[in-house]
Amino acid sequence: MKIYSDGTRVLDWAEAEIIIRTYADSLKHSKKVDHNQLNALQQILLLIGASEKELNGNIRLQKEAFLVANEYLDYERKLEDLRFVPYRLGPYSFKLAELTNALIISGYLGYRGRKNSNNQAYYLTSKGRNIFNKLRKSNSKLAKTITMARKELDEFSPAGLLRYIYSKPEYRKYTTKSTVKKLYMDVTWGRHGA
């Protein structure tokens, strides 16, 4: 078993299948969602389902999930922590990547394009859409917030999302391991910023 730097464990298929079934059962049988508590799978389904458009690329998935959790949802909400860590392109969640793959394997998400690339586009399958509709009905305020966030964030290119994140002082701790930091650093014109 492999363990990432954020503590996310990569399971073998037998372990993963048990967890996927457990999460899938909890999604199927959840009649009402507490708007103050969202597990990671619910967060992913609400983000991807918030628009009729596919969510294009891993950079967009990672950065939109990061910004939705940090800027659009109230801090008092009890979201399951996606454990974002500094990585090559800024904030990255191994947990988000693993759970997204689990949702694909279990049939709640589909994708087009080359897997694990920015050409990969995620969408809800009919099975995923059914769960999304339950989540949306049980908490329309949260669904509206995420829909608004997705609409606003989809206006940015992947580079624009990175530029925005890199420009915020409170997110600097997520850029320490970035391989593209110099592309998005603030430019100060004139002598010593004068």
Image (cartoon, grey):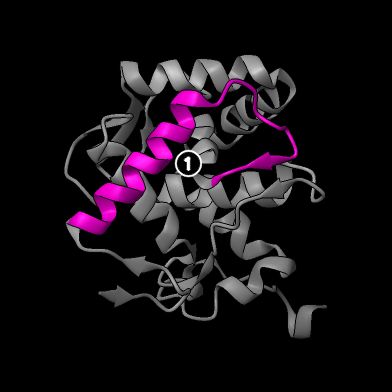
Residue drawn at x 63%, y 43% is 68
Q: Pointer 1: what residue?
A: 41
* Residue 27 is covered by the magenta coloring: yes
Relative to residue 102, is residue 173 drawn left or right? right
Q: Secondary structure at mark 1?
A: helix
* Residue 43 is covered by the magenta coloring: no
Residue drawn at x 33%, y 33% is 122
**How many other residues sit within 10 Å of disc 1, few (<14), some (14-19) or many (≥20)?**
some
Residue nearest the observer in this picture, 26 or 98? 26
What is the x, y in percent for residue 18?
Answer: 30, 49
Residue 116 seen from this side: yes
Residue drawn at x 50%, y 73% is 181
What is the x, y in percent for residue 65?
Answer: 54, 46
Residue 117 seen from this side: no
Residue 57 lies, with reference to residue 3, above or below; the image says above
Quarter of the picture containing the N terminus is bottom left
Q: Amino acid at mark 1?
A: Leu
Residue 159 lies, with reference to residue 173, above or below; the image says above
Residue 144 lies, with reference to residue 5, above or below; the image says above
Instruction: Classify residue 124 by image quadrant.
Output: top left
Residue nearest the observer in this picture, 20 or 160? 20
**Where does the magenta region start and end?**
14-39
Relative to residue 177, is residue 16 drawn left or right? left
What is the x, y in percent for residue 99?
Answer: 38, 49
Relative to residue 136, is residue 119 drawn left or right? left
What is the x, y in percent for residue 35?
Answer: 72, 32
Quarter of the picture containing the C terminus is bottom right
Relative to residue 179, is residue 75 drawn left or right? right
